């Protein structure tokens, strides 16, 4: 799907959340998961939001990452995603398309979080970082 359409679909969801009063951009912090997935999407989104922080959920141990992806696919009953070839393709896509987003935003906005920790700890680190970025209660996108 072209980047413009992907971002427009995301924007439509945000607009619906604003209209439904479940997201209030003047007081809420927006935490995105899974977008932008590439530098093209990041450039388009720069016109829409002010990105203050990027959370890089890091799992440098490729064997552990491979195992986690396989477990998640099986847990979610996505059997095709548990296939080793599919996982290798996903990792290759991350390296070529998604990882360059980190360079686009630069080290000063990146918070690296160890994704091998338990989910509650990962969430705690994200919340601590959000609080540190936005202690003033100003609207922000992270």
Image (cartoon, rainbow, N blue to C red):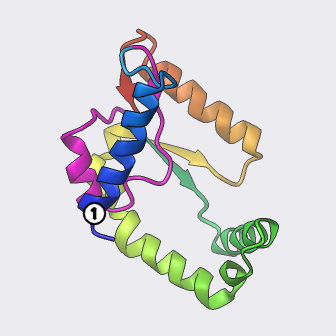
9 relative position to 20: left or right: left
Mark 1 burial class by Cα count in 10 Å: few <14, some 14-19, many 20+: some
Task: Residue 32: give x, y in percent of width and height.
Answer: 46, 42
Queried whether the magenta region covers residue 46, the answer comes back as yes
Q: Which residues are magenta?
A: 27-53
- Residue 53 appearing in the image: no
43 relative position to 128: left or right: left
Q: Residue at x 43, y 18 (%)?
A: 134
Q: Residue at x 41, y 26 (%)?
A: 19
Farthest residue, direction top: 136
Q: Residue at x 57, y 34 (%)?
A: 126
- Residue 94 appearing in the image: yes
Quarter holding the N terminus is bottom left
Quarter holding the C terminus is top left
Task: Residue 132: give x, y in percent of width and height.
Answer: 48, 20
Q: Of residues 60 and 18, which is closer to you in this image?
A: 18
User: What residue does disc 1 label?
Assistant: 3
Whether 54 is drawn above or below 80: the answer is above
23 relative position to 49: left or right: right
Q: Of residues 93 and 58, which is closer to you in this image?
A: 93
Q: Magenta region, mostly helix, strand or loop?
A: loop
Farthest residue, direction bottom: 85
């Amino acid at each position: 799907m072209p980047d413009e359409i992907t971002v427009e679909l995301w924007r439509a969801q945000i607009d619906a959340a604003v209209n439904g009063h479940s997201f209030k951009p003047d007081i809420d912090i927006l935490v995105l998961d899974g977008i932008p997935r590439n530098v093209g999407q990041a450039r388009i989104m720069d016109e829409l939001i002010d990105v203050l922080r990027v959370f890089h959920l890091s799992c440098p141990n490729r064997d552990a990452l491979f195992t986690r992806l396989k477990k998640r696919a099986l847990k979610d009953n996505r059997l095709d995603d548990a296939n080793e070839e599919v996982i290798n393709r996903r990792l290759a896509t991350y390296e070529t398309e998604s990882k360059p987003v980190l360079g686009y935003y630069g080290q000063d906005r990146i918070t690296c979080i160890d994704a091998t920790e338990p989910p509650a700890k990962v969430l705690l680190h994200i919340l601590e970082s959000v609080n540190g970025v936005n202690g003033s209660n100003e609207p922000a996108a992270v």
